[in-house]
């Protein structure tokens, strides 16, 4: 953790907004290391709560086993339990939640209970056409998981993984150009109200997420540092 990271009287709460492939996971991990925060995604929260057998986790398990969607109330209950744990003392980064203004309002209510607030909602802005190329061209080594890309990162020796020497590679079935374009359109339609919601609250920050990872990380760190001060 960066020793110069500013202290805050209440644990920080950051929200990352951005379509699939925008780099939210990568940037969240870098912010975790720099500021001592904890990244929380809805999927990870649900899996952990189910595995731990918490009351909310048991509710979620029953709902998922029935093939239904876990309600906002259960997700909020799981989040309430999680942010109270000691490792979240400095704050959390929410990735994938909230997805709707109803969820955003429920999150505001939860934070009001805990004496916290949204420090910043950071929107990672991307170029849709470039994102289609970025995502549809990626593949991984089936043996070690090393990532590659048709245009940006090919193995030094064609067909052979640089890391382990394996020759089998996988592509996600939903990483076709058509599917990616559809996911981007759905994201923009779903997230537009959230952008307006957090802009109205004065906590929305935007950053160009099409540059180099380290450059984006520097901009993100500046936003977070100011938001936590």
Image: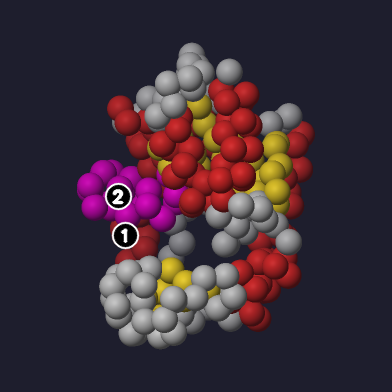
> Looking at the rendering, in which quadrant would you find the N terminus?
top left
Disc 1, disc 2: CB below 8 Å?
no
Give the quarter of the image for residue 229. top right
Q: How many marks?
A: 2
Residue in the image at 35% along x and 35% along y:
81
Residue 105 is at least partly visible in this image: no
Q: What residue sits 55% from the left and 54% below the top?
A: 23
Question: Looking at the image, is 98 positioned above or below residue 189?
Answer: above
State the image coordinates of residue 95 (x, y, percent, origin top left). 51, 48
Inspect the magenta stretch and tell me whether residue 52 lies in it.
yes
- Element assignment for label 1: helix
Disc 2, SS: helix
In the image as oriented, which residue stretches furthest toward the top? 9
Magenta residues, dominant SS class: helix
Q: Which residue is mark 2?
A: 48
Q: Is residue 115 magenta?
A: no
Quick one: which residue is furthest to the front in this view?
A: 156
Q: In the figure, 178 relative to 56: above or below?
A: below
Q: Is residue 7 above or below residue 68?
A: above
Q: Which residue is mark 1?
A: 62
Q: Quadrant of residue 70?
A: bottom left
Q: Position of residue 4 (x, y in %)?
A: 48, 20
Nearer the observer: mark 1 or 2; the answer is 2
Q: How is the image coloured?
A: secondary structure
Q: Which residues are magenta?
A: 40-59
Image point 44% across, 26% down: which residue? 2
């Amino acid at each position: 953790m960066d020793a110069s990271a500013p202290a805050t009287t209440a644990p920080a709460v950051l929200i990352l907004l951005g379509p699939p492939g925008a780099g939210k996971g990568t940037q969240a991990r870098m912010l975790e290391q720099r500021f001592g925060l904890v990244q929380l995604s809805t999927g990870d929260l649900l899996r952990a709560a189910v595995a731990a057998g918490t009351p909310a986790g048991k509710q979620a398990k029953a709902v998922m086993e029935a093939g239904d969607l876990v309600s906002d109330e259960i997700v909020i209950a799981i989040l309430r339990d999680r942010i109270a744990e000691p490792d979240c003392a400095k704050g959390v980064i929410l990735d994938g939640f909230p997805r709707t203004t109803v969820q955003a309002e429920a999150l505001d209510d939860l934070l009001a209970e805990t004496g916290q607030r949204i420090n910043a909602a950071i929107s990672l802005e991307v170029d849709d056409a470039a994102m289609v190329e970025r995502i549809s061209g990626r593949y991984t080594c089936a043996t070690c998981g090393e990532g590659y890309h048709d245009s940006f990162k090919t193995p030094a020796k064609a067909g052979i993984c640089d890391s382990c020497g394996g020759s089998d590679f996988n592509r996600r079935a939903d990483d076709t150009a058509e599917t990616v374009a559809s996911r981007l359109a759905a994201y923009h339609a779903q997230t537009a109200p959230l952008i307006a919601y957090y802009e109205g609250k004065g906590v929305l920050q935007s950053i160009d997420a099409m540059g180099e990872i380290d450059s984006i990380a520097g901009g993100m760190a500046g936003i977070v540092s100011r938001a936590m001060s």
